[in-house]
Amino acid sequence: MSSSSTVSSGSVSPIGPPAETIEQRTERRRLSTIDRYLPVWIVAAMVIGILLGKVFPDIDQALDRVRIAGVSLPIAIGLLWMMYPVLAKVRYESLGRFSTQGKLFAVSTLLNWIVGPILMFALAWIFLPDLPEYRNGLILIGIARCIAMVLIWNTLACGDGDVAAVLVAVNSVFQIVMYAVLGWLFLTAIPSWFGADSTALDLSMADIAVNVAFFLGIPLLAGIITRLVLVSRKGADWYDTAFIPRIGPTALLGLLYTIVIMFSMQGDRLLDAPLDVLRIAIPLVVYFGLMFTLAFLIARRAGFSYEETAAISFTAAGNNFELAIAVAIGVFGIASGEAFAGVVGPLIEVPVLISLVYVALWLRDRLFPELSSIAAAPGTVGSSHIVARQRAFPAIDRSEGSDA
């Protein structure tokens, strides 16, 4: 058989395998070591947390004894732990390229600060018209835009880490300025327009600024310092191919640790009031699904790449549950229905968002066919999808290139 017929038949040609074959092999390797069983680990972490809560009934009081920025210290440690490796990956020296990305910021702002809060407000009233405390709790979640776990979901979905970091930073600024305003609007003003029950929200921007500064500012500053110092001493190649592969997987360990702590502290409440949990969970699942799908389709229609689309979509779908919980406890009390809804929020968000990671990868192959249609020579990168994977998992892609 001639070489031309070999190429036409889809077999490996003399000049090297096509990019699709490299992608399939890289995907299989990456999933086998990191992602493939992540849902299993998450479920296991939930079960372990619930069992800990049952074996040690007072564990929630012990873990909640010390609070930082309105959040339990063990949970705060987990949030900082899982955010630092992701923020250490960001190429801060190249972020200037976003200064001309007006359309990207416009789409993200529209989704996060107009569509998201309105959608959650509507779903809260549709599904919980008779439970005002739970309804208020969902609204508090809806107006708190994500600044933490979104970075994990975006990385797992091979999204653009730089875009996600910039959008998270923008959301943080908006959050400081707009959270109290949106809380007043959706809890007090709009319900009163329709003659419905309204709720007063006494909240200062300073309280929100402390929360944002702690959960985003600390890991962000640590990531910037780490990159600047190590790149200057060891070089960018060593940093991206040696250091990042070592600390990158620890972000998932931080995620699992946080899940164990959350479920150990609140798992008994889920078991004691399953119907209430179900009623809170239904609008949350609908919200996460609709926000992700809407954001993904809008970003795709606007002409963004898959990596940018994934970053926009997960940023729009995720919520800042630590801020929502802190506000609910501070304003309404730890035993309030608002606080209970806030606690249920992340417990539902984690499994739903990890499921949406796989939905994003499935949509990538169908809505971005150009990613698998570009051939690559041995040892080279032939699609933007492989570029994204290289940035998230540089050691794996480096070994793949040597195999090719």
Image (tube, rainbow, N blue to C red):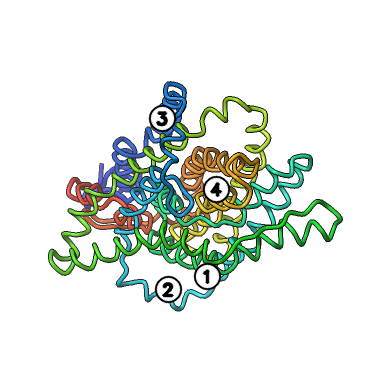
Cα distance between the residues tagged 2 and 3? 37 Å
| Label 3 vs label 4, nearer the camera | 4
Q: Where is residue 150 in the image (x, y as percent from the top left)?
A: 46, 52
Q: Using the image as rendered, state which of residue 227 and residue 390 is in the foreground.
A: 227
Q: Count residues near mark 3 (Cα–Cα under 10 Å), then give few for <14, some for 14-19, many for 20+.
A: few
Q: Name the residue under label 3.
A: 40
Query: Which kind of residue does numbered mark 2 sit on?
Result: Phe
Q: What element carries label 1?
A: helix
Q: Which of disc 4 and disc 1 is earlier in sequence?
A: 1
Cα distance between the residues tagged 1 and 3? 35 Å
Query: Which kind of residue does numbered mark 3 sit on?
Result: Val
Q: Mark 1 points at which residue?
A: 105
Q: Residue at 40% x, 40% y: name it.
A: 258
Q: Where is residue 133 in the image (x, y as percent from the top left)?
A: 70, 43
Q: Position of residue 312 (x, y in %)?
A: 51, 59
Q: Which of disc 4 and disc 3 is earlier in sequence?
A: 3
Q: Is residue 6 visible?
A: no
Q: Name the residue under label 2.
A: 98
Q: Residue at 61% x, 61% y: name it.
A: 203
Q: Is mark 3 on a helix, strand or loop?
A: helix
Q: Count residues near mark 2 (Cα–Cα under 10 Å), then give few for <14, some for 14-19, many for 20+.
A: few
Q: Is mark 4 on a helix, strand or loop?
A: helix
